Image (spheres, rainbow, N blue to C red):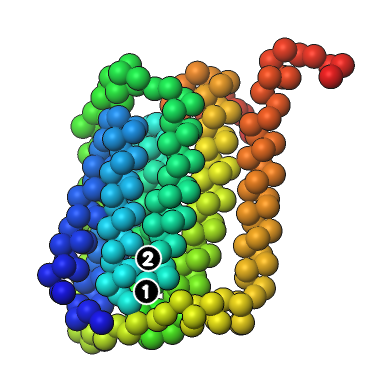
Amino acid sequence: MTGLFYFTMLIALLAALQVVRGLNAVHALLHLIVTLLALSLLFFLLGAPFAAALQVIVYAGAIMVLMVFVIMMLNQGDAAVEQERAWLDVASWRVPGLLCGLLLLELGYLLLAPADGGRVRAVDAAAVGRTLFGPYLLLVELASMLLLAALVGAWHLVRPLKNRREGTSDD
Amino acid sequence: MTEIPVEHGLLFAAALFCIGLVGVLVRRNLVFMLMSLELMLNATAFVFVLGGALHGNADGQVMFVMILTLAAAEVAVGLALVVHLYHRHRSLDADRLDVMKG
């Protein structure tokens, strides 16, 4: 069980690395989906089956489908891969990668310094629902308003392309 | 459920977050930057679920649902912006967006 946990973590990290250094957008997206599925398995192992199901259905399902559609609309072919290869040279990798590595080392040092581990306990979906619609009800309302704002914002950003280019004022 | 030290889970989340951070800093393609942002959001969501499992209450998963909502809103607006900018500039290069001038 513990070995399964570390193995899944390893898969998630390797797939995340492939996302960051991938050249083809669709391949990177597939690796991102692998990362999300690995995280879902981790949630399940942590005793959070509701979060695991939501991760698969909403994240790996709905949100990633949105990204697939947009990548299809942008229609990037082999030329885009060549362009990515030109953009992603070692000189641009070096400094941010080094700084983030240092940050990670520091975080690891801080996390591993005190040693008082705890046991994880399973939380089922009913408890999540009671908490979500009990003390956090206001947060749910705010989230719905956020989603509405995102919907209106996305619609507004994409809609007026055609009218603006043609410059028509009468319709 | 599973016998792993909490520090290792946090370390995993930190590593995932740093990978996403490197992606946002290094990549110039807007689509890849959005994907790296997703990685960072997932790392934080993992920490919330881990904390909820550690204390045995549902607050962690509630925050996970909120992060999921936030990610959906962010991806919707972000991808709409990407489509718009691609139609206008014929490029996904983030460095070319300095022509916006506020």
Residue B89, image x, y percentages: 53, 20
Quadrant (top left, top right, bottom left, bottom right) of the N terminus of chain B: bottom left
Mark 2 → mark 1, Cα distance in angstroms:
6 Å
Q: Considering only vertical position in the picture, is A87 above or below B12?
A: above
Q: What residue type is labelled 2?
A: Ala
Which structural element holds mark 2? Answer: helix
Q: Is residue A154 left or right of residue A22?
A: right
Residue A48 badge: 1
Q: Which amino acid does label 1 sit on?
A: Ala
Residue at numbered disc 2: A52
Residue A96 visible within the image: no
Q: Which residue is pictured at 28% across the width and 49% down the height?
A: A34
Relative image position of residue A99 (x, y in whole percent): 27, 50
In the picture shown, does residue A126 fall above or below A41?
Answer: below
Q: Which chain carries label 2?
A: A
The structure residue drawn at horizontal position 28% and vertical position 64%, both measured from the top left corner, is A41
Confirm whether residue A93 shows in the render.
yes
Nearer to the camera, A158 or A122: A122
Left or right of A161? Residue A30 is left
Q: Where is residue A68 in the image (x, y as percent from the top left)?
A: 43, 36
The C terminus of chain B - image quarter: top right
The x, y position of residue A96, in whole percent, is: 29, 44
Q: Residue A103: which quarter of the image?
A: bottom left
Asked if the residues shown at circle 2 and circle 1 are in contact, with their CB atoms under 8 angstroms apart, the answer is yes
Secondary structure of the residue carrying numbered label 1: loop
What chain is tagged by disc 1?
A
**Do the dots labelled 2 and 1 sit on one chain?**
yes
Residue in view at x 39 percent, y 43 percent = B35
